[in-house]
Amino acid sequence: MGRDRYVDFLRAWAIGLVVFGHWLITALEHGPGGEIDAPELLAVVPWTQWLTLAFQVMPLFFLAGGYAAAGSWARERAAGGTAAGWVGRRALRLLLPTGVYSGLVLAAVGVCAAVGVDADTLALVGWALAMQFWFLPVYLLLSALTPPLHAAHRRWGPRVPVVMGAVALGADALVVAGQVPYLGLLNYVLVWGVAYQLGFCWRDGLLGGRRAVPAVLAAAGGVAFALLVWLGPFPVSLILVTGQDPSNTNPPSAAMLAWAVAQVGLCLLVAPGVRQALERERVWRVVRPVGGASMTLYLWHMVPVLVVAAAFYLTGLAPEPRFGSVAWWGMRVPWLLVLGVVLAGVVWALRPVERGLAVVHEAVVHEAVGHERRMRPGVGLPPAWALWLGLASGTGALSRFAVQGFAPEGRFPVLPALGLAVGLASVLLSGRWRAGVRRPRRPEEGPKRALEEAA
């Protein structure tokens, strides 16, 4: 099966809306003491919570991720590869750019804390630069679980996401009832896992063969969401709002599950028309670079906000109409344009870094073949355990950053920083997965290899 342009389009579309949505709701103004505040638009202007119905597109990320992972893992299995090998390569593609981004931000936090930058300001900036990190540990977990999840899919097909959704509903009922609040943590994997698992079904033609199935998903999910908001306890906002309880995202709720199902159905309904448009090279030339830079855009898109804040708000150059007024909304247009120009400059400046990370990734995988053959049983840390230890450490660190930011209470986060460093190093150094698919050795390679090893 060839590369599906529509899947790449979903990534590009989703990342574009995430960036646009974050920029739209981010507001800056001078406080009474002259400091810069960031009022919460969704809380101060409640009607804006309806806008989150358009901007909450993370189900598309997980749907596209599941589709791509199913094909990649199926090819790995057919070539004789291992689960550790496949999971390690997928994890490294995410952890390398995340490690670079986090390392630079943490270095800046350390310098600012050392020179005495105001703790509240540093905490706010650290939170803004990590607000998107919640997605990373969830996606890492689902990637690590892909082999057993795909095995379940091959055996039971669409019944797997149905069961996952049912368990998620039960967990959410207990959370809303206040009996087992920590059970909601499961829904980060279950709710987003439903969209991920539906990606498996989509790739195997279990969803898109007939328009009736996507239509049922879209209608059932949409009606369920409307009823849960209208009759149930859930808010309309699909983004966390301070003081709102229950929340649809922290943890993902039954309403979020319904919206994810509706969004999956809708994107499958429009797929034929969008695929036809993507066949035009003019359209594809716009979509392809955005999809290719999706990780860079996702990680770095809040940096332009800090640049603009320093250039226009700290200097007093930016006009500040009354928050939420018509004039304020009018100022959103130049605000978005300036941020877009700055982000384009950031992405351009990061192109050498991206190329360097790609070279590192390829070099690590290539070198691993010889490394694995030199490994001896019982020597050093078992490679598979090194991989899983690295994933656990990295996932825990990213979760802490997502919750507390890069500068909790204005301090340098020593333990999360150490956890991310250990996680990335362990994944890099784990030997078994790096060899990837084992290439059968030709007969003439035996003597040659023996001479090389003797030398």
Image (cartoon, rainbow, N blue to C red):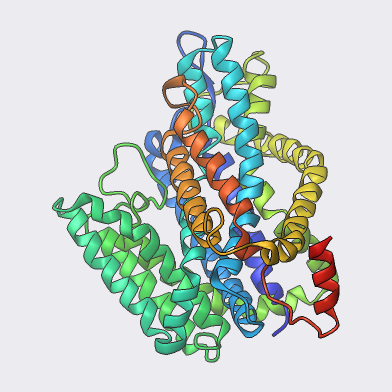
Q: Would you identify the image quadrant in which residue 242 lies?
A: top left
Residue 264: x and y in percent read: 49, 72
* Towards the viewer: 447 or 213: 447
Depth order, front residue of 395/63: 395
Image check: 330 left or right of 359?
Answer: left
Q: Position of residue 346 (x, y in %)?
A: 75, 38
Identify the residue shown where x is 84% and y is 65%: 452
- Is residue 302 in view from this perspective? no
Closer to the camera in the image, 357 or 445? 445
Position in image of residue 99 (x %, y %): 62, 42
Above-or-below relation of 187 to 105: below
> Which quadrant: the N terminus?
bottom right
Look at 45% across and 28% down and name the residue there.
39
Image check: 109 left or right of 124?
right
101 vs 106: above or below: below
Residue 55, placed above or below residue 313: below
Return the residue found at the far bottom. Answer: 210
